[in-house]
Amino acid sequence: MKGKQSLSFILSTLLLTSVILSGCGENKNVKSEGASEAKQQETTINPLGKYDPPIDVTAAKFITQDVKYPDGQSEENNAWESLYKEMGINLKYDWIVKGTDAQYFQKLNVTIASGDIPDLMMVNSTQLKQLVEADMLEDITDAYNQYATPEVKSIFEKDKMALQSAAFDNKLYAIPKTEPMIGGQTPVLWVRTDWLKKLNLPEPKTWEDVLNTMKAFTTQDPDGNSKQDTFGVALSKEVVNGYPSVNGFFNAYGAYPRIWTKDSSGKLIYGSIQPEVKTALAQLADMYKAGELDKEFGVKDGSKVAESLVNDRVGLLFGPSWAVQWPLQDNKKKNNEAEWRALAIPSIDGGDAAVQMPFGASFYFVVKKGVTHPEIVIKMANLFTEKLYGQSADYLKYGVDAEGITTAKYSFVDLAAPDKDLKRSQNVAEALKNTDPSKLNPEEKSTYDKIITFQQEGDLNFYGETYQSGPDGAMMVLQKLWDGKKIVSEGYGGAPTETMGEKKATLDKMETEIFTKIIYGAASIDSFDKFVEDWKKLGGEQITKEVNEWNASQK
Amino acid sequence: MVEGKSLGLKLFRIFNYTLLISLAVVCLVPLIHILAVSLSSNVAASAGIVKLWPKDLTFKSYAFVLSKGEFLLSLWISVKRVLIGTVVSMLLTILIAYPLSKSGRELKFRTGYAWYFVFTILFSGGLIPWYMTIRTTGLLDSIWALVLPNAVPVFNVILLLNFFRGLPKELEEAAFVDGSGYWKTLWRIYVPLSMPSIATIGLFTIVSHWNSWFDGLILMNSQNNYPLSSYLQTIIVQSSLTNMSAEQLKNLASVSDRTVKSAQIFVGALPILACYPFLQKYFVKGMVLGGVKG
């Protein structure tokens, strides 16, 4: 059975491509409810206007595993669904997947291939490109210009590449689901300060300090059990990206693995093949030899490494701001002496290292071609910003309710300004200083309350929130880097190029393999040069060309 | 048991038993580990210090799982699926295997029919046509979408067909002489005599219905209709950490609840575990007889 399924899956992928390429021309049986209202809408453009009479819209919905509902509510009956009904939008779900995005996109692939797509859906960048090429999506350029509220537009002003990535031939086909990447994926240096104290070490200010700390954490028995069972720094089998990655370690050396950065002439270059990576790898290999890395890192995935962290075996971590919520908070719960603080990663040249940030949008909200109200997706985006942060905002109803359930996740369309998390921390810090939360928006207020609860009652469930978004938290560190322009963002924002689609997975695998081998000492550091050559030969050169063609077309 | 006669035989026995026992242990250990994790506290589980014995024994996760509507609902769907699916599938298997076990003289175009079935083992339409067929027939989102598409497991038909052939022809002839028709002969003579084989095939069918998750995921449009294995798939499988968006990565914190997951896996495996001992005794007999005689 299994074999048959995977075979049929390969077949389906082939079919999917062929169906899409062949155009799916018969797809004109579009529902035409509310055709007469279209005219009426043209005369009065109201970004938050109601549809009267109501319109029916079909949709496919993805719900992440962690979404919860208050008693008596469900995915088809909640605050946001009622709001849509009030607005005259009757959402009918063709189907709903609650699970992983892989499962959602698998099902969506089948739906797209079978030629019967819903009016509204969330797609990934590959599907977006395929659907645009198959002419199955509605051009929403005009709708965006006419309907988007200033708040929504300002989000895309701050994150220009996101909107560009949804445009083909200067026509906009989707609203990108932007995410606040600065708090999500940008690395800081997490240090166990209780271990520093125990070993009489200074807070690491220079890269030299960091390396010394790693050594000391390995050899000087920071957990005091007289056993050599601790490592300098956490590392997983993914090495680059993944969790916990050592991207931050590479960044210290001025290396930016797995992202495209602009060189001095404005061309995009691939971070993993730059000479700085070699220097960083040589250092990691030395550390492995000295026992400062987990001997078994090559087989440990994120949750295994998290176990080491919770078990007091690692004291340094290059990780995102939320690492303190998971798994470091569990470490604190298990061992109350543990203290984790975020620091900026020092650069080998002194000062703070510029750290890498991935692209802010990987998913897109699209409208099927021929739908009478293509602006509906923009109205939903308007509603999202309005009901959470606008004048008629009701955060307790539409954001996070009194019991801490994130109701904002029920919204069909969601998007966030790239610096949202930073702003929140700033405002919360300000409020904490003056002990005056009156100016905070509801989201900020909830962070404020959690920090207060932690400070006054020592509730460890809010340890993570406190050191992520509080005044001594990771966000403050990131704010400093943001202000100092020390953030290196991903420079490529298009859908995977043709060669990327064919070769990228292989190239990435090769990269992880060779990096792992070099760190293990199974391959000499000079094999990095061979890897660079291989990378170029095996498709990397072509990808670089395609990426730069895209880059040139964006101006 | 006969006392060991020679040293060689004794050594052989010792070796044999050690091997078999260690194999059994290898199979059991993961299950015991899951059980131990499900009975431990959250912190102990996420620290990875739970091995085969629960740390900080608690039944919290079981209480949570059993009070969780989604879980119980999908469990019920699975039970329904197994009941309906097995009955339908066994009925069809028997009804197809019997005529096909006759010679070409008794059933015209027998070879043609047989190839018709075998063809479906070798070739399938692929995922998209499969999906489109089920959609056009209006089965999407109903229990029948899980039951009907696989209602005739051809491999099982061949197994049973061979078993039928292995039964002495004289029995059937005697029944005919006594005035019984094909129909009665099948139900009165063949089916009772083939219990080992039918039990084996039944077990195959039950297990495959219980375990298959992919069709549930693709064919069911709402989570309320997921069978248990599809439901477990959505909560246990995490997307690879590399491709996760920031949002999802943040969510890891809240879904990393390993004790609850383990409890669900264990409760999910329980019914099928309980089935095995009762059907297992037929297992070997059913398979071997089906294959050797003929």
Image (spheres, coloured by chain):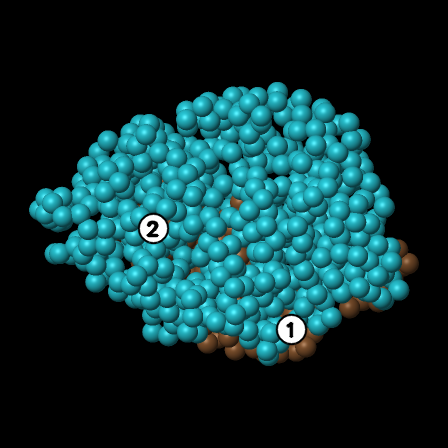
Chain colours: A cyan, B brown
Which of the labelled discs sits on residue A151, or is there none? Answer: 2
Q: Give whichever of A185, A364 is nearer the camera.
A: A185
Viewport quadrant of the C terminus of chain A: top left
Measured as percent of width and height from the top left, residue A411 is found at 34, 58
* Residue A341 horizontal side relative to residue B65, left or right: right
Chain designation of label 1: B
**Callout 1 secondary element:** loop
- Disc number placed over residue B40 in the picture, else none: 1
Residues at discs 2 and 1 in contact (Cβ within 8 Å)? no
Q: Amino acid at mark 1?
A: Ser
The residue positioned 61% from the left and 60% from the top of the image is A473
Q: Is residue B174 above or below residue A259?
A: below
Q: Report whether A47 appears left or right of B274.
A: left
> What's the residue at 70%, 28% (across, down)?
A275
Where is residue B119? Give x, y as percent: 41, 37
**Residue at 88% from the left image edge and 64% from the top image edge:** A226
Where residue A155 appears, as percent x and y from the top left, is: 39, 47
Residue drawn at 48 percent across, 59 percent down: A424
Above-or-below relation of B96 to B262: above
Q: Secondary structure at mark 2?
A: helix
Q: Residue furthest front?
A: A434
Indicate the quadrant where residue A15 lies. Answer: top left
The answer to which of A351 and B200 lies nearer the viewer is A351
Q: Can you see residue A243?
A: no
Q: Is residue B87 left or right of residue B266?
A: left
Name the foreground residue: B271 vs A428. Answer: A428
Q: What whole-number distance in Å separates the C-alpha atoms at marks 2 and 1?
A: 48 Å
Dot 2 surroundings within 10 Å: few (below 14), some, or many (20 or more)?
A: some
